[in-house]
Image (tube, rainbow, N blue to C red):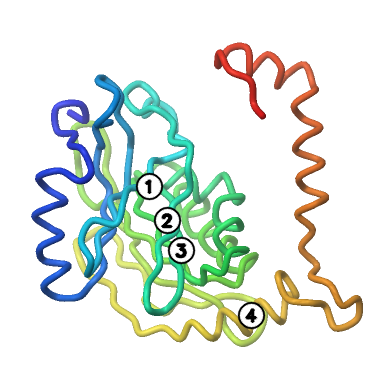
Amino acid sequence: MHWTSAETIPGPATLELAELTSMYGVYVVLGMPEKDAENAGIYYNSAAVLGPEGVIGSYRKIHPAGKESIWAAKGKDPLMFDTPWGPVGVGICHDTYCFPELTRYYSALGSRLYLNPTAVSNVQGWKDLYYTQLKARSIENGAYVVSSNLVGKDDTSFFPGGSLILGPCLTLGTEYYAEPIEDKEGMVIATIDLSIADSARKLLTLFNNNSITGKPDWRPDIYTRMLDSLKDTETWKQEKELAGSVVK
């Protein structure tokens, strides 16, 4: 299904939609299988990003999950796009719930809004994974999170929806700006104040200077050294050999 319906980005579907985003001056981010224009037989689980200026680009999912890896190659690059309200980051599903590095990366670069097109089925425990991790990404980054989940049946799964808009409040924690819609199609809409994200980050002293130390509490130099040290362990040496490349 994914191979036969995949298109390049830009391609027929995204170019047609780009006419609408240009006409109405809006942004659209949608999930779709992407065909690599330069490498025949390579496909990605992607999010196409369109705006008033047309096709902006595509985010290729960095962490395909489970059987998804049968058809989808791993993406390599984050995607953050500019808007009049500041930069916006994009991730897909598994990227968001199990790999907090991506959301933190965007947030450190100034993104206050993170978009999560996703396909979470109603397997046991889905609510814990879905709602808990979305709240965690918001709280730990002082960021707004918009998540759009599938709803209804396909050949093998049932998707429960749960699309929502959540974000920081003026105290520690997070709140729903648009409550989740489950088990039916619908549209969630909210007006958000991105300056609240700035206030939340100051409260958490993530990327702003701590009033006592004069430095941010976030320490990427330490994390970089920790991650670099992993490359010399036997487990990750073997991973690099299996992948047929050396991580630099």
Q: Residues within 10 Å of mark 1 (few under 14, many from 20)?
A: many
In front: label 1 or label 3? 1
Mark-to-mark CA distance, 4 and 3: 15 Å
The N terminus lies in quadrant: top left
x 36%, y 68%: residue: 180
Residue 200 - label: 4
Give the SS element for disc 1. strand
Which quarter of the picture shows residue 46? top left
Amino acid residing under circle 2: Val
Which of the numbered marks, if any, corresponds to residue 192?
none
Quadrant of the rendered structure where residue 141 is?
A: bottom right
Circles 3 and 2 in contact, beta carbons < 8 Å: yes
Q: Circle 3 sits in a helix, a strand or a loop, which is it?
A: strand
Q: Residue 144: x percent and y percent?
A: 49, 71
- First in sequence: mark 4 or mark 1? 1
Amino acid beneath label 4: Ala
Q: Nearer the viewer, mark 2 or mark 4?
A: 2
Of pointers 2 and 4, the one earlier in the residue sequence:
2
Residue underneath mark 3? 114
How many other residues sit within 10 Å of disc 3, few (<14), some (14-19) or many (≥20)?
many
CA gap, disc 3 and disc 2 = 6 Å
Residue at 20% x, 61% y: name it. 54
Q: Which is more foreground, mark 4 or mark 1?
A: 1
Residue type pointed to by label 1? Tyr
Taking 223 as reference, is 218 above or below it?
below
Give the residue number, with chain letter if any, for mark 2.
90
Q: In this view, does 50 lie to the left or right of 102?
A: left
| N-term mark: 3 or 2 | 2
- Asked whether the residues under the numbered discs 2 and 4 touch, taking CB atoms below 8 Å apart as contact, a structural biologist would say no
Report the disc number at residue 59.
1
The quadrant of the picture occupied by the C terminus is top right
